[in-house]
Amino acid sequence: MMEDGGLLYQAFIYLVAAVCSVPLAKRLGLGSVLGYLIAGVLIGPFVFQLVGDQSDVMHFAEFGVVMMLFLVGLELKPTLLWRLRTPILGMGGLQLTATTVVLALLGVVAGLSWQSAVAIGLILAMSSTAIVLQTLSEKGLIKTQAGQSSFSVLLFQDIAVIPILAALPLLALHDPSASIEALRQTHESVALEGWQQTLAIFAIIAGIIIGGHFLMRPIFRFIAKSRLREIFTAAALVLVIGIALAMQAVGLSPALGAFLAGVVLADSEYRHELESNIEPFKSLLLGLFFISVGASIDFVLLLNEPLLIFSLVVTLVAVKLITLIAIGFLFRLPTTDNFLFSFALAQGGEFAFVLFAFATQNQVLTSEIVDPLILTVAISMLITPILIVVHDRLLQPRLNVSRTADTPDNIDDINPVIIAGFGRFGQVVGRLLHANGFNTTVLDHDATQIELLRKFGYKVFYGDASQTDLLHAAGIEQAKLLVIAIGDPEKVMKIADHVSKNFPDLRIIARARGRVDAYELIRRGVQLVHRETFGAGLDAGVEALRCLGFRAYQAVRAGRTFKYHDEEAIRELSKLREGEAQYISRSIQLRAELEALLQRDDEQFKNYEDHAWEAAPPRGK
């Protein structure tokens, strides 16, 4: 009972720490990862001493990385993964090799043997998959060029863990026969040797690929027919855990196996259901992992050797940062993406804890060398979210300002249309205008998107369209039409306020997320408001009527009537306040009026069809 009580107490402490720290960190713009790390520091043995040794907890929590890579794989169809082969092999391989060489040379200069220096270089060359992907996902940057490049490097590192584990015993400082024995023990979990081991590895990988394509769909289809969500959740967990155990049994990375399974299932109709079931477990386990990292920081060693630890952290981050910037430059990443890519990966990784322990067991490194390095990795992981914040708030705005400041000098003509935001919504408008011979000036803050648009001949300004200087630089004084296609409602309202006040004659077409945003825009004087999902939903409704027996013209007419009535209702209701009795009462009245109007149209259509048959009497009468 005491042991159970202790486990409940530990779980309570972890949850309280997360609930208190993470929302506060996100509110301050620091991200959830830094919140988890700070929570771990506070509850750890060197601050409030609420939890003890983290090795067992961290080993369990590392399964969150396995689940995360499974979810990443679900987002990457095999065709997309094939397109990423160059950055995976090129950028990933070059990063691991270059960083290892530089760190190994520094180790030799510091007086270490070349074997120890190479081992340290290989281990410290790894970056944190958990922290990087979680941070980029939170910011919505995982699909940008910087995000894809970061993912490619991380994936190569995860693949490289296996050969690194095999190579480390060969760098042992003592008896070579012991190294060979240690190498053999890296695969001690299975009683196979030589070609049998290789065959088992290929069999497991083939099983994942073939099973994912031909077996998992009918299995998930059978489970889905039970209509029990908890059973589907259990099946999803069985899939991930089973693959992780199989990969571990043959000495491969469980995370790599889970990623491969995700890629295979990326085209499955059950992809979204798998994501929704695995996501909560992944988030909780990753949070537990980050808390464990924070709690494992050895502040006693840090206080005893502050200059040594500070020097190691600065050296590690600086070497990786400079190496990554050079690689990004070599692979022609845009400057803004290159700096984000470099700042994101300039830390040690979670695999370092495993690899350092393995190197110590096999007498490759001594505990006197490993202890400061483990602390260095933990601190580098702790400051990574801070580095991202520094990049976002200090470096990125300077790059944006410099590019925006240069843009007005390139204006050689004024276009009649300005499009603010060129995502999914703005692209449809822009392409239609261009197809009909109208030139546009596009404003967007996504550097990757900007580079692509310029290749297609669009006139683009880089920067935040809610900044009035950028609007003036784009020639808003001479423009005939402004299309506000930005997804951020606050920025949309800010632009609408500025333009309505200073350019009352300029026509504005604005994107709204829904009725509430539409009300706000109409109140600001914007007459042409388009809700981003209304058109698609209306088209789907018209098709639904046709499927239920309506004639094509009848369904289209009903859709037009609905659209006209709904837009008129939006304008009328915008004068009222949501939630008030008058608003609710009038909304009910308008809905009843719409139903009566559609029923009347339906009756007229049927009468018209009846009379149409009577208008042409049969021949011979």
Image (tube, grey):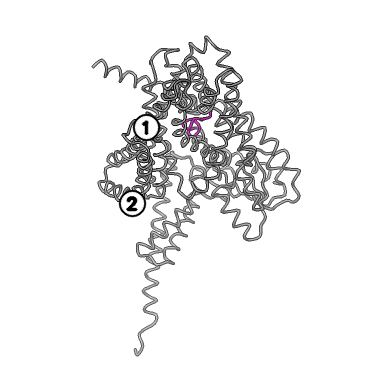
| Secondary structure mostly seen in the magenta stretch | helix
On the rendered structure, is 16 left or right of 228?
Answer: right
Residue 556 at x, y = what percent? 45, 63
Disc 2: which residue:
214
- What segment carries the magenta color? 125-134
Q: What's the mark number on residue 82?
A: none
For the point 39% across and 76% down, which residue is it?
Answer: 612
Q: What element carries label 2?
A: helix
> Relative to the observer, which residue lies in front, 372 or 173?
173
Q: How far apart are marks 1 and 2 (CA)?
A: 30 Å
Quickly name the residue at label 1.
187
Amino acid type, callout 2 = Phe
Mark toward the viewer: 1 or 2: 1
In the picture provided, is 305 more to the left or to the right than 231? right
In the image, residue 357 sits, relative to residue 526, either above or below, namely above
User: Toward which corner of the image does residue 98 lie, by quadrant?
Assistant: top right
Q: Residues within 10 Å of mark 1 (few under 14, many from 20)?
A: some
Task: Left or right? Give the position of 89 relative to 45.
Answer: right
**Which amino acid, by three-letter code, is at mark 1?**
His
Residue toward you, 315 or 370 = 370
> Residue at horizontal 34%, vertical 22%?
11
* Foreground residue among 278 and 121: 121
Most distant residue in the top direction: 304
Outermost residue toward the bottom?
A: 620
Residue 68 relative to residue 404: left or right: left
- Packing grade of label 2 (10 A; few <14, some 14-19, many >=20) is few
- Whether 304 is drawn above or below 340: the answer is above
Residue 324 horizontal/vertical position (percent): 60, 33
Q: x, y (%) of residue 308?
A: 57, 14
- Image location (x, y in percent) of residue 219: 29, 48
As drawn, 586 above or below 615: above
